[in-house]
Amino acid sequence: MPSAWLLPEHLSDVLPAQARVLESLRRGLLDRAVRYGYELVVPPLIEHVESLLSGTGHELDLRTFKLVDQLSGRTLGVRADTTPQAARIDAHLLNRDGVTRLCYCGPVLHARPSGGLTTREPLQFGAELFGHAGLEAELEVLELAVDSLAAAGVPGPVIDLADARVLRAVLSGVVADPSRLQDIAAALAEKDAASLASLAAPLPGPVREGLVALTRLYGGCEVLGEARACLPPRPLLHEALGELEWLSRHLRVAFPEAEVGFDLAETRGYAYYSGVRFAVYAAGASDALVRGGRYDEVGAVFGRARPAVGFSLDVKALAASAADVSAPAAIRAPWSEAPELRAAVRRLRDAGETVVTALPGDPGPEASHVFDRELVEVAGRWVLQAARAGAAASH
């Protein structure tokens, strides 16, 4: 029989030191979004599964835990992504005519981990902008994403730009089974030339050549020129490449320390995204900290297919790349029934100080605090003094 204290695979407790880091990041991320004008929403953890999976494709369906509601008998889902919930709130509850900016931060649950060492319970922070179809919305969301990493102390961001319309332009006029198109997108994302060649074999020659060319189109600004030279000269492609060029130019001005590049074969979420998409990495990292882009159809199932662009990140993953958060300074106080001491402790706590009382029999500080001061009695009054060596110990 398994031990009662063992947790399911890819789930773990968040202990005090890590929880302190996560909470510091959560507050900083939300504060940054609020400064951009984003309003906080807190959707429920479970919803009717149809709502959670609206417009998100097959991948999210596989990652969503499902259960039967004992009240209604309907199938519920535990959210694996908060974006559809934000779209529902925008379309159905707020129902505004103009631009709506929403942000959120809360746990999501995945039925399957995205990698061998990843958690199935990310702490997802995200920001969504609804109601504006212009590139200005993409630029704002990208700036907020990069600013969010900077606020967390992540140095030297690497910004990767792509666009779902590039593949659509290459495949324009092709009639193919949707599953084959999904497989082609997956092979491109993995730069799997062998699988791509097999999947593209029945397609017209120019299309096959364009798909193969996409696997080579990643790097700096030269990629856009190469794409114009070797991909089919279609209006949709011209529009996509022009918008990527505009965004990259503005990002380099706003973030001169950032590295901006392109990966035109980045097609993950091909069926979900409708335009520009992006990923932001920490310098030297192999996996993105932030992913986002434009997904204009996400609200269609709720009756309002509003333009939409946004991003999300896992705060737990961000913590590994963020600047260290030092242990909080605290005051050590003895325990006593004396009204004067108890009043002094209350005054300090009301002033925002952390005061830890040494309860009777307590062998010493075990919490993750740095005790830099202590309350001591001097001439009948309780005063703050620098902690003595024993009282200042931190764990």
Image: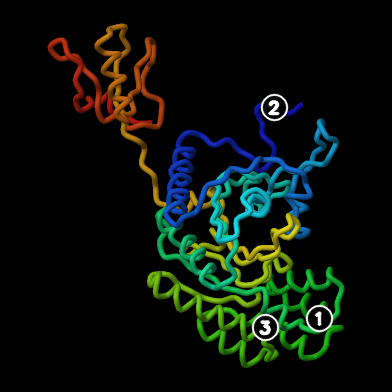
Up-down relation of residue 183 to residue 2 (above or below): below
Q: Where is mark 3, residue-wise?
A: 236
Asked whether 206 or 103 is in front, the reply is 103
**Is residue 70 visible to the viewer in this orientation of the structure?**
yes
Up-down relation of residue 302 to residue 366 (above or below): below
**Between marks 3 and 2, how big is the CA–CA gap?**
58 Å
Up-down relation of residue 157 to residue 378 (above or below): below
Sequence-wise first label, 1 or 2: 2
User: 10 Å neighbourhood of mark 2: few (<14), some, or many (≥20)?
Assistant: few
Sequence-wise first label, 3 or 1: 1
Residue 77, quarter of picture: top right
Specify the amino acid type for callout 2: Ser
Secondary element at tag 2: loop
In the image, 70: left or right of 127? Answer: right
Nearer the observer: mark 1 or 2; the answer is: 1
Q: Position of residue 55 (x, y in %)?
A: 74, 59
Specify the amino acid type for callout 1: Ala
User: 10 Å neighbourhood of mark 3: few (<14), some, or many (≥20)?
Assistant: some
**Between marks 1 and 2, how big is the CA–CA gap?**
51 Å
User: Which residue is at 66% across, 31% downward?
Assistant: 6
**Between marks 3 and 1, how big is the CA–CA gap?**
21 Å
User: 10 Å neighbourhood of mark 1: few (<14), some, or many (≥20)?
Assistant: some
Sequence-wise first label, 3 or 2: 2
Q: Which mark is residue 3?
A: 2
Q: Position of residue 295 (x, y in %)?
A: 66, 65
From this viewpoint, which residue is outermost toward the left?
379
**Is residue 393 visible to the viewer in this orientation of the structure?**
no
Q: Which mark is residue 200?
A: 1
In the image, 291: left or right of 345? Answer: right
Q: Position of residue 305 (x, y in %)?
A: 70, 63
